[in-house]
Amino acid sequence: MTPTHRMAALLLASGLPGLAHADFIDDSKASVELRNFYFNRDFRQEGARDKAEEWAQGFLLRLESGYTEGTVGFGVDALGMLGFKLDSGDGTAGSGLLPADGSGGSQDEYSKLGLTGKVKVSNSTLKVGALHFRSPIVSANDSRLLPQTFQGALLNVQEIDNLIVQGGQINRIKANSSTDYTKMSANRIGGTSDDFVFGGADYKITPALTAGLHYGKLEDIYQQYYGTLSHLLQLGEGQSFKTDLRYASSREDGNFRDIDNRAFGAMFTYSLGGHAVGAGYQRMSGDDPFPYIASSDPFLVNFVQINDFANIDERSWQVRYDYNFAAMGIPGLTFMTRYISGDNVQVGASNGGKEWERNTDIGYVFQEGALKNLGVKWRNATVRSNFGNDLDENRLILSYSLALW
């Protein structure tokens, strides 16, 4: 670490008097990420608005300290975020890239800061403050200019071989394009709550087979049990077959309203060299859609670019194809396309609802030269439905990451 970097780490440690020991400083790291994001969503159904179209620039500075020496180690992380509007014409706001300005448009700029204290004992860590993590029961979204964060506490325990235990409590959520923490609500269910508790474990039964069981409760709204099972079968050099099974059972918590949902998902993927071909099935049962914290990411096999295919009684199928051009000697270039079709959706008194979505992603990350670590990704989606929106969407994302130390 250079003297300049050591000074920056010392500044990060200044909020913890007496704790800036060698490991705290020498194990610290920092990085900056730049995101240039163009978003265009055309609404195709009769009577809808024309489009949502915006272009914005984002900056993310991540600072992570090491831990102080001793049996109990202390540390601190910081995430600073800035977003700037580059273009947003009259009537085209609402892409999720920028905060609303109160008059139908978007703000010219916004910023937010996330601070996290952390404690480590043996192979276990406790983080308190701003959180951005993923799990089967709750996951933060990062599909716009700046990532979403939670406020709360996260415990990760890895004291037994092949077993990971995770749990915690969340009391607020800060959306991608928001500068304020707000209470949480349930997607399609409603209500508000300032307490989500969760816990679970994933156990690697064999090197190829992993099972998980997780529980979450959004106080006074819903509670949910989630079981997972994944297996990777090696079929020889460059070949494999992956099985991903998921089942969730959700019911009400408190007296907000009755909730009844059971969600099953299965995804099977065959890989050969740079190719991967997948097929998935998802089924919703019960009187309600699949509940999850609004604006976060649900752990569903058919949660894709726009839709989650988790409406009441919905059945959905997916076919997917991926190709990694590294197999052709072009590392950094990737391609993905998929098609999802859903039917049997309860709409009014019948189950005649149907929808489909098609996604295509093409991405390239420069591997060397002056543009090394510059990523370019084009994401395209088409959605058609007889009960919801008809959409054509394009996202163009340029990203650049640089480790400062």
Image (cartoon, rainbow, N blue to C red):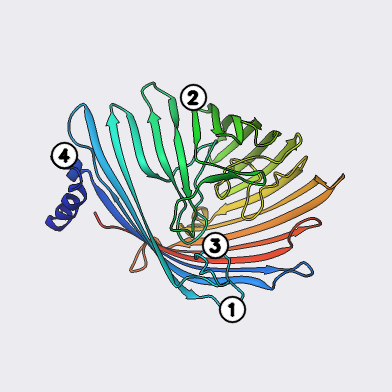
Q: Are marks 4 and 2 in contact (CB under 8 Å)?
A: no
Label 3: how many Cα within 10 Å (few below 14, some 14–19, many 20+): many
> In percent of the image, x 54 and y 32: which residue is there?
216
Do we see residue 1 in this rendering? no
Q: Earlier in the sequence, mark 2 or mark 3?
A: 3
Q: Between label 4 and label 2, give the one nearer the viewer.
A: 4
Residue 276 at what x, y percent from top left? 60, 47
Nearer the observer: mark 1 or 4; the answer is: 1
Q: Is residue 289 left or right of residue 111?
A: right
Can residue 317 be seen at all in this image of the molecule?
Answer: yes
Residue highlighted by disc 1: 90
Between circles 2 and 3, the one closer to the viewer is 3
Indicate the position of residue 199 as horizontal and vertical percent values: 49, 29
Disc 1 from disc 2: Cα separation:
52 Å
Nearer to us of marks 3 and 1 is 1
Residue 401: mark in rendering: none
**Residue that badge 4 annotates:** 19
Sooner in the amino-acid sequence: mark 1 or mark 4: 4
Quadrant of the rendered image containing residue 254: top right
Instruction: Find the distance from the CA under tag 4 to the CA under tag 2.
Output: 35 Å
Give how far apart the Cα atoms at labels 3 and 1 are.
Answer: 16 Å
The circle on residue 203 is: 2
> What is the three-letter code of the residue carrying label 4?
Leu
Neighbor class of circle 4 (other Cα within 10 Å; few <14, some 14-19, many 20+) is: some
Q: Which residue matches tag 3? A: 96
Task: Report the amino acid beneath label 1.
Answer: Asp
Query: Where is 311 relative to 226, above or below?
Result: below
